[in-house]
Amino acid sequence: MSKKNNSALKRMLGYAWVEDKSIYFLCAIYTLAAIMVPVISVALPKVIIGYLTEGEALVSGIVRLALIFFISGATVYFLKEWLLDYTYPRITTLRIDYIKEQAVKLLTMDYKYMEQAEFFNSRERAFESTSSNNNGVEGIFHKLFELPQLVLIVLALSVFIGIKSIWILLALILHIFVTTYIAIIVQKYQYKRKEELSKKERRVS
């Protein structure tokens, strides 16, 4: 299968794998740390309550447990935030590599395309996709980096909600399905009218 037949998301993931495989490893460690943060917060009260109900509890024992959980939680949270900040410039580097490839293509393409408004209208979104840290290619990479931990947390909450009430879970699933379906329709419509939208945006700017 050629690259053109692959989705943009698959091409981006493959590009990240080729350019910087360590991002995947950092993402795995970040996911584990991000999941551990709420787990530690939930486990602390349960452990202390269990300690108080087992027998004669000592104040020193409660303080010791609280310190252990506090240090563990602080360490995991620091690791989570550090990994997020450490990976940020590496993801920015991926966007800069895209910009370099765009520059090479612009400098080596036939001159006749430089005078065609249709050419720039059809590729305006491609230029915009590498123009910022918060959206476009880099914005998607940042969201993908945080996506695994969000998916795992949502799955865990779904199981918990499903145990309590299957109807609430079904309502949430239906809501997610409908909003996702609408978002896909809007995205397809925007892509279908991309040249017209780009032309209007270029006139405004």
Image (cartoon, rainbow, N blue to C red):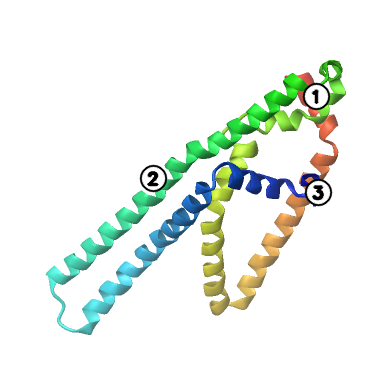
Location of the C terminus (image quadrant): top right
Secondary structure under tag 2 reads: helix
Which residue is denoted by mark 1 in the rendering? 120
Which residue is denoted by mark 3 in the rendering? 5
Q: Is residue 197 above or below residue 37?
A: above
* Residue 179: assigned label: none
* Residue 137 in view (yes/no): yes
Q: Residues within 10 Å of mark 2 (few under 14, many from 20)?
A: few
Real-space Cα separation, disc 2 to disc 3, in angstroms: 37 Å
- Give the mark, 2 or 3, whose residue is nearer the N terminus: 3
Mark 1 is on which residue type?
A: Phe
Q: Which residue is drawn at the image coordinates 22% and 83% (left, top)? A: 54
Coordinates of residue 88 in the picture (x, y in percent): 49, 39
194 with respect to 79 (left or right):
right
Which residue is denoted by mark 2 in the rendering? 82
Real-space Cα separation, disc 1 to disc 2, in angstroms: 40 Å
- Give the mark, 1 or 2, whose residue is nearer the N terminus: 2
Q: Is residue 168 above or below residue 112?
A: below
Q: Residues within 10 Å of mark 1 (few under 14, many from 20)?
A: some
